[in-house]
Each structure stands twice: as structure tokens, then as C-alpha cells.
Image (cartoon, rainbow, N blue to C red):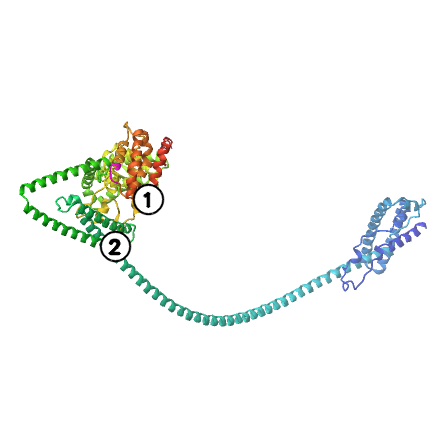
């Protein structure tokens, strides 16, 4: 039958396929292959298989399949009966069903492959349908069954082998892990041993270095002790040298102070002796006028020599041995001069006595009367001449009376609060301190920042003087807390104003105007404070009167220097530069005060101590004999601050006064000024010449404008 031949062709095609070439190799595990390495490929039929299957008639295929199945069943039954094994029958039945399913799958796959084939393959197919064949032969089914059973057995063996290999690998891993753990322990022990050895080596090395460093330290300590001994020796030598120098300095200071005291006593004695040569003490002398003039001239020369020595010491230096020799020599000459004058006077008196014994009493009286009349006329003429030429040596009587009244008023004010000033209980002392702070601290805060700040300071001081409470240091204080508090506050307030002049204004000239403005406002509302300001100013700077206090008999030189305004302490008299600086500051404050009026005052008119007092001061200065250094300094400071205001107020009269100052008074200043004191004289001369040349005096620097009071 044709289908018979096609069946074997199909089996041949299956044999040649990948499925038919599956082989089993017992050595797969040795080569490291997978047990199913040959079965992992996808099964596929040959292209020719599809062509053959298409030729098989579906009907004939079904018939042949049915016949074959019957035949196979019969054969199977026969074999089953012959073998007596029902197991083979079941296996064959299963194999048959598997083959059938495989055939259907292959047919479907072949059909899909045939559809996808190219036209060339389709042309190969023959239009003649081949005869149908049956694939379900007993031999094929047996073969397939054996193949499947073999594959299952191989899979089971592979699983067992895989399981054994996994167990062996786990054991091997455990063994390796144990070996590695033991090796790690050995390695750690080895590393610990090495660390101990290195630590021991390090400790030995550190011990050696420690011993070496201790040896070096001992050596350094020994060297240090040696240096310390040498240094101590040097320090002892330096200390001894310092002590010697300190002793020498102390000795020099002691000798200097002793020389200074001796110099002061010499000056005091020589001034007293010189006063004996004045005409006022020689009215009854019998010496001729020419002799008296020569004695006075020589006495003035000796006083000048001593004054030169004293002026050097006023600069903070002690008199040297040469200076003391000059002073002592001048004192000896003065004593000799006085002794000579006394001897000459004795001789003259004896001679006159002899003449008086020989002359008649009436003639003697007549001569005396004539002599007295002549002397009186000469003195009167000398006074008139001095007044005409402006050679007064002191202030006018009215000025001195005014000066004395102010000082007496200040002394009475100080006496009125003596109980508060010398209080012993703590509460009164604390009140006194708070009152003093409330009065002085605001004045220290005066500056040129703004007018509103000056107004606040003025209102605070006005409240304090009016008996109202003010806050000072976080605490409220008032003059009503003590009956003597108002006098105390007024006195301290005036004292602080003057102190600001000699300290603040002396260093910063522009500060005179804000301080003077506040002082003028306080003076307007509280006149008693204004009188105290003048009293303190006159006491510290008598040239502001102006007044040149004379030296009275028996007055020590240091006390007289205090009266003139010098600061005298244990170190001696202050230097001339410091003295002039303080006097300049106070005169500038006075000049600023007399030309300013408090802008917020309620009273109309000029300032409480106005420009008329400045005119009086300037005229009085020009009527007095100038003093070296101080007169030129004060005139320059006063005119620089107040000259513009006096010019506007007095106009032509002011320029006449300036001309008088330049032409007549200035030469007198130059005559009494030494070559080392010409600085102030030159400044005054330049100021006068510039002012007269321009017919104008510029406003002073720092003068408060209307814009300032709006700030």
C-alpha cells in the first residue's frame, strides 16, 4: 500500500530530526555538562516531513489510523496475554496517546512552517496525494515509551546526583569555612604576637629615649641653674645699681628741694630788702637822691637775677648749684648793698646831726617844711605823670573794692554750707556727693554737638537751682533735702564753670562758647551764681579783674605765687607754659561769656554781664603797667574772642583803643619782655597789624550761630 511506504518515510524523517538524534552519555557529569543538555533544544521536524504529511489524505489517514489502532490493540492484547503483564499494556496505551498528541502537534507545527515557506518549497510539492500511512505501530509506540521511561529514569538519576553533589558541596563549604576560621585564628594570633613584639620594641625604644631625654633634661637643668645663678648675680648688681641711682636721685631731689626752699627764702629776703630801697620806705632817709637811685637800680638788677633763676625752676626743674651760687651771690651783694646804704645813711645822719647842732631850730624847721613841700609836689607830679602815661601798678580803687566784695561774698557762701561740707554721718555725705554730681556732671557734658543738648543741660541745672528734683545716677535728688544744699550747689556749679575754662577751654578754644552760653543763661536766672562765677574766676585768674596783687611784707614766695594764679604743690611751682595755658583758657571763657545771651531767656536786653564789662577790662589793662609774657597773651586771647563783638558795639572808639594799644602800649610790652618770651608778643603784634590794615576783626572760631540752636 502506498500509505505503508509513506509511513516509513515519515519515520526516517523523524529519525533524522533533532529528537531522533538524542543520545545519552554517561560521562556528562565529568565534562561539567547539564544532564538534559541534549534535550534542551527545541524539537522540530524536517521541512520534507511537512510536505509528506500534506499529501496524506485525511480520510485514508483516519482509516489507517483506526485500522492500525485495532491491529495495535490486538497485538497489545496478544502480547499482554502472552506476557501476562498488564503494566506493559498500560504503558503502551499511554505511549500511544503521547504519540498521537505528538503527531497532532507536529502536524500543526509543520502546517505553520509550510505556510511560512517560500514559493520555492511549495513548487516542490507534488499535486499527487501520497497514500495514507499509520504512525501508531507497536514498535514505534514501544520505542517512544522506552525513550520516555529512559528520560524519566535519567531525570531521577540526575536529581539524585544533583542532590548528592549539593550535599557534597555543602560539606565541602563547611570544611573550607572551618579551615578558613582556623586559619583566621592563626592569623590573628600571629598578628597579636607581632603587635606585642612591636609594642615591646616600641616600649624599649621609648625607655631608651626617656633615659636620654632625662639625661638631656638634667643637663639643661644644670645649665639653667647656672644661667639663673648668673642672672641672679646680674639682677642683684642691677638692683644695687638701681638702689644707688634711686638713692642718688632721692639725694638729688632732696638737695633740689632744699635748694628750691633756699632759693625761695633767698628771693623772699632779697625782695624784702629791695622793698626797703623803695621811695615809700626812704622818705626819712638822709641819703641824697642820686645815691638812693643808684641803690634802687642795683637792687632791681639783683632782684632780676634771682627772678631769672626762679623762672627756670618754675618750668619744673630744680635749681642747679650754679643757679644757687648766682642767687647767693646776689643775696650777699644785696646785703652788702643794704649794709653800705645803712653805713652811708649813718654817716649822713651823723653829718646832718652835726649840721643841725650848728643851725638854728627855726631854720631847721623851715628847711624841713620846704623839703617836705617839694617832696609832696614831686610825688604829686609823679602820680599825675604816671596817670597820664598809664603807668599804674595796680587796679583802680573801685575795681579793687569790687574784687574784694566778690571774694568776701564767695567766702560767706562757703561758710554758709560748712555744716553740709564737713558732715560726718553717711547719709549726709551721700547726699552731698549726689548733689555735687548733679551740679558738675551736666557741665562736663557741654559740647558743640547741638543746641537741643545745651538746652537740656541748662534746664537740668535750672531745675536743680530752683529746688526741683532731678535724676542723677539713677536716683532723684533735690536741694530741698538739706537747708544748706542750695548754697552748696551754687558754689560747686560756679567752681565747675571756671574749672572747665582752665581745663577744657584751655585745650579746645571752641568750647568757650557753649560753656559761656549756659553760664550766661544760669547767670540771668540765678544772679548769685553769676557772682560766684566771677569770684572763682578772679581768684584763679586775678588778671581777669584785671588786678596785679602786690607782694605784702611777710608773705612767703609760694603763697604769693598762688595769689598770682600759679599752681604750687610738693613738686614745686608749675611751668610757665602750663600757667599761661590755664590763664588763656579762663580769659577766653570770660570773653565768650560777656558777649553771649541765653537765646531762650525771658528777659530782654543784653547779657547779665555784657560787653560794657569787656570794654572796662580792656581799658583797665591799658592803664596798667604791662607784665612780661602774661599781658601780651591775655590781650591776644581776649581780642581774638571778643574783638569782633566790641568792634560792632563801639565802632570808632574801639579802633582808637586799638591804635593806642599798638602805638603806645605795645612798646611797653616789648620793653618788659625778654628774648625767650617773644612768642605771645609776636602773635599780638601780627593780630593788631592785620586788624588795623583790614579795618576788620574776623568772628571767632566756634561762635554759636542761629543754625546751631535749631539742631
Residue hosting label 1: 678
The alpha-carbon separation of the residues under discs 1 and 2 comes to 25 Å
* Left or right: 74 as drawn, with respect to 506: right
Nearest the viewer among 641 and 510 is 641
Q: Is residue 222 visible?
A: yes
- Report x, y in % for residue 160: 73, 62
The crowding category of the residue bearing disc 1, from other C-alpha atoms within 10 Å (few below 14, some 14 to 19, many at least 20), is: some
Q: Which residue lies at the image location 14% right of the left edge and 47% below the top edge?
A: 287
- Report x, y in % for residue 215: 45, 72
- Report x, y in % for residue 126: 94, 46
Residue 638 versus residue 325 in the image, above or below: above
Query: The C terminus appears in which quarter of the rendering?
Result: top left
Highlighted range, magenta: 621-625
Residue 285 versus residue 400 in the image, above or below: below
Query: For numbered disc 2, what is the local secondary structure?
Result: helix
- Report x, y in % for residue 561: 23, 47
Nearest the viewer among 472 and 132 is 472
Amino acid at each position: 500500500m502506498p500509505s505503508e511506504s509513506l509511513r516509513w518515510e515519515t519515520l526516517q524523517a523523524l529519525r533524522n530530526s533533532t529528537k531522533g538524534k538524542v543520545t545519552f552519555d554517561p560521562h556528562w557529569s565529568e565534562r561539567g555538562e547539564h544532564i538534559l543538555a541534549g534535550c534542551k533544544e527545541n524539537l522540530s521536524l524536517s521541512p520534507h516531513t511537512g510536505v509528506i504529511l500534506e499529501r496524506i489524505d485525511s480520510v485514508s489517514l483516519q482509516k489507517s489510523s483506526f485500522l492500525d489502532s485495532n491491529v495495535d490493540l490486538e497485538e497489545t492484547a496478544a502480547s499482554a496475554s502472552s506476557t501476562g503483564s498488564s503494566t506493559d499494556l498500560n504503558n503502551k496505551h499511554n505511549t500511544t496517546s503521547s504519540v498521537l498528541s505528538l503527531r497532532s502537534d507536529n502536524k500543526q507545527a509543520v502546517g505553520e512552517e509550510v505556510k511560512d515557506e517560500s514559493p520555492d518549497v511549495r513548487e516542490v510539492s507534488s499535486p499527487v496525494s501520497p497514500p495514507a500511512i499509520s504512525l501508531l505501530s507497536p514498535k514505534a509506540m514501544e520505542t517512544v515509551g522506552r525513550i520516555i521511561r529512559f528520560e524519566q529514569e535519567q531525570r531521577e538519576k540526575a536529581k539524585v546526583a544533583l542532590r548528592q553533589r549539593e550535599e557534597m558541596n555543602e560539606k565541602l563549604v563547611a570544611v573550607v569555612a572551618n579551615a578558613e576560621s582556623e586559619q583566621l585564628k592563626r592569623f590573628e594570633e600571629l598578628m597579636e604576637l607581632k603587635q606585642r613584639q612591636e609594642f615591646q620594641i616600641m616600649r624599649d625604644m621609648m625607655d631608651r629615649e626617656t633615659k636620654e631625654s632625662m639625661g638631656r633634661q638634667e643637663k639643661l637643668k644644670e645649665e639653667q641653674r647656672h644661667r639663673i645663678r648668673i642672672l641672679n648675680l646680674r639682677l642683684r648688681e642691677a638692683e644695687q645699681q638701681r638702689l644707688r641711682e634711686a638713692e642718688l636721685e632721692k639725694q638729688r631731689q632732696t638737695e633740689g628741694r632744699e635748694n628750691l626752699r633756699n632759693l625761695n627764702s633767698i628771693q623772699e629776703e632779697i625782695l624784702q630788702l629791695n622793698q626797703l630801697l623803695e621811695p615809700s620806705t626812704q622818705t626819712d632817709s638822709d641819703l641824697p637822691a642820686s645815691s638812693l637811685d643808684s641803690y634802687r637800680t642795683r637792687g632791681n638788677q639783683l632782684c632780676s637775677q634771682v627772678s631769672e633763676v626762679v623762672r627756670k625752676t618754675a618750668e619744673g626743674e630744680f635749681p642747679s648749684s650754679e643757679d644757687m651760687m648766682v642767687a647767693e651771690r646776689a643775696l650777699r651783694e644785696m646785703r652788702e648793698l643794704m649794709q653800705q646804704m645803712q653805713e652811708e645813711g649813718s654817716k649822713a645822719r651823723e653829718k646832718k646831726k652835726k649840721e643841725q647842732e650848728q643851725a638854728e631850730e627855726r631854720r631847721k624847721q623851715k628847711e624841713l617844711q620846704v623839703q617836705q613841700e617839694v617832696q609832696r609836689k614831686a610825688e604829686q607830679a609823679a602820680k599825675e605823670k604816671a596817670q597820664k602815661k598809664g603807668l599804674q601798678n595796680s587796679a583802680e580803687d573801685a575795681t579793687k573794692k569790687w574784687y574784694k566784695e566778690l571774694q568776701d561774698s564767695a567766702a560767706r557762701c562757703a561758710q554758709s554750707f560748712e555744716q553740709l561740707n564737713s558732715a560726718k554721718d553717711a547719709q549726709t555725705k551721700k547726699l552731698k556727693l549726689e548733689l555735687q554730681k548733679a551740679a558738675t556732671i551736666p557741665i562736663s557734658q557741654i559740647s558743640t554737638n547741638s543746641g537741643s543738648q545745651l538746652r537740656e543741660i541748662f534746664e537740668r541745672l535750672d531745675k536743680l537751682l530752683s529746688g526741683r528734683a532731678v535724676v542723677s545716677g539713677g536716683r532723684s535728688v533735690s536741694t530741698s533735702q538739706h537747708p544748706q544744699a542750695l548754697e552748696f550747689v551754687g558754689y560747686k556749679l560756679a567752681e565747675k564753670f571756671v574749672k572747665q575754662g582752665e581745663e577744657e577751654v584751655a585745650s579746645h578754644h571752641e568750647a568757650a562758647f557753649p560753656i559761656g552760653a549756659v553760664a550766661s543763661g544760669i547767670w540771668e536766672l540765678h544772679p548769685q551764681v553769676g557772682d560766684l562765677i566771677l569770684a572763682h574766676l578772679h581768684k584763679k585768674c586775678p588778671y581777669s579783674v584785671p588786678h596785679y596783687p602786690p607782694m605784702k611784707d611777710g608773705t612767703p614766695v609760694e603763697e604769693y605765687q598762688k595769689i598770682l594764679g600759679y599752681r604750687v604743690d610738693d613738686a614745686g611751682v608749675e611751668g610757665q607754659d602750663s600757667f599761661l595755658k590755664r590763664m588763656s583758657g579762663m580769659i577766653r571763657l570770660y570773653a565768650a561769656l560777656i558777649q553771649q545771651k541765653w537765646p531762650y531767656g525771658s528777659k530782654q536786653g543784653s547779657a547779665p554781664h555784657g560787653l560794657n564789662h569787656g570794654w572796662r577790662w580792656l581799658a583797665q589793662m591799658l592803664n596798667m603797667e604791662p607784665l612780661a609774657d602774661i599781658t601780651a597773651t591775655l590781650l591776644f586771647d581776649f581780642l581774638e574772642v571778643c574783638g569782633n563783638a566790641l568792634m560792632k558795639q563801639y565802632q570808632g572808639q574801639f579802633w582808637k583803643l586799638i591804635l593806642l594799644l599798638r602805638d603806645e602800649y605795645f612798646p611797653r610790652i616789648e620793653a618788659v619782655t625778654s628774648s625767650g618770651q617773644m612768642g605771645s608778643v609776636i602773635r599780638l603784634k601780627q593780630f593788631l597789624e592785620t586788624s588795623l590794615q583790614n579795618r576788620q576783626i574776623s568772628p571767632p572760631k566756634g561762635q554759636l550761630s542761629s543754625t546751631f540752636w535749631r539742631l
